[in-house]
Amino acid sequence: MTFAATVLTLYPEMFPGPLGASLSGDALSRGLWSLEARQIRDHGIGRHRNVDDTPAGGGVGMVLRCDVLAAAIDAAVPPDDPRPKLLMSPRGRPLRQARVRELAGGPGAIIVCGRFEGVDERVIEGRGLEEVSIGDYVLSGGEIAALVLLDACVRLIPGVMGKESSGLDESFEGNRLEYPQYTRPREWEGRPIPDVLMSGNHAAIEKWRRAEAERITRERRPDLLSPSSSP
Ligand code: SAH
């Protein structure tokens, strides 16, 4: 089973974008995952293929029409498609590594990218879209958010990263941030690599890393240490 991503967007030319380079790009050409970007405007209304309209009740900006988006989704997704249908949205549940891992282990995802002021609420309900946020700030569109989500997923697909295990030690795994990393030179601008890392004593190194991860998490992200805050 390969991870199959279908992205619905007004800017399909933004894909694969940066995901065409480096590890994710190699994995894409090796067929470890697939990416299809579909143009929402193909389902637009009338000669001008309109996709948006003014907000009911007044206010600034434009809203993506529910009928247009639903038609785009229905054309892309057969009824028995097992993939979760996601809508990138600042109102969504904040994306965390645990959800990324779940998605990466599944059949893929359908990802709807909003634009303008967002999308008509009824298509979220009517097509059962799961709203996903990549953080507490507002982007101009869902495309970069979708690229972020896909990048996080793709690097966890078996065979994508050089060493299979290298995902398990990282920030957010086990609700800890990562310990500090060092490499050559041995000393730089008067700053040596901590002695313990040069000691060859693997138990001591492991202990130091665990303590450092704990310390940094406590300093920077105490919220990660209380399980209730990590949905
Ligand atoms: N008016 C909306 C913001 C719309 S931003 C509001 O106040 O909630 C336009 C589109 O960008 C959204 O529909 C969504 O698809 C995307 N987007 C913006 N910020 C995002 C975020 N933090 N996470 C995921 N998607 C985001």
Image (tube, rainbow, N blue to C red):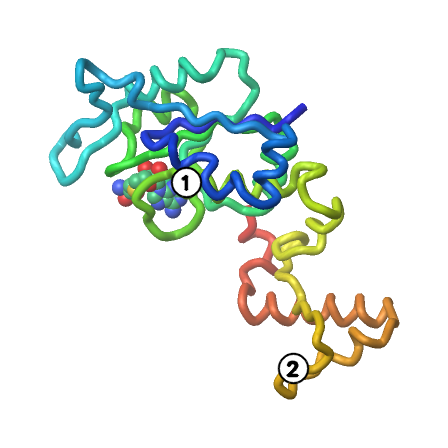
User: Residue 193, how many percent across, how many down?
Assistant: 72, 78
Nearest the viewer among 178 and 228 is 178
Q: Is residue 103 left or right of residue 194?
A: left
Residue 125: tell me if it is visible. Answer: yes
How far, Cα to Cα, is label 1 from label 2? 44 Å
Q: Quadrant of ligand 1?
A: top left
User: Residue 69, how many percent across, how many down?
Assistant: 32, 22
User: Which residue is rendered at x = 50% and y = 44% of the image?
Assistant: 95
Residue 90: tell me if it is visible. Answer: no
Q: Secondary structure at mark 1?
A: strand
Amino acid type at mark 2:
Trp
User: Which residue is rendered at x = 40% and y = 30% of the image?
Assistant: 112
Question: Marks 1 and 2: CB-CB under 8 Å?
Answer: no
Q: Which residue is mark 2?
A: 188
Dot 2 alpha-carbon crowd within 10 angstroms: few under 14, some 14 to 19, many 20 or more:
few
| Residue 201 against residue 43 in the figure, above or below | below
Q: Specify the label residue 92 is tagged with.
A: 1
Q: Is mark 1 within 8 Å of ligand 1?
A: yes
Q: Is residue 165 left or right of residue 40?
A: right
Q: Earlier in the sequence, mark 1 or mark 2?
A: 1
User: Which residue is rendered at x = 29% and y = 31% of the image?
Assistant: 119
Count the labels in the image.
2
| Residue 77 against residue 187 in the figure, above or below | above
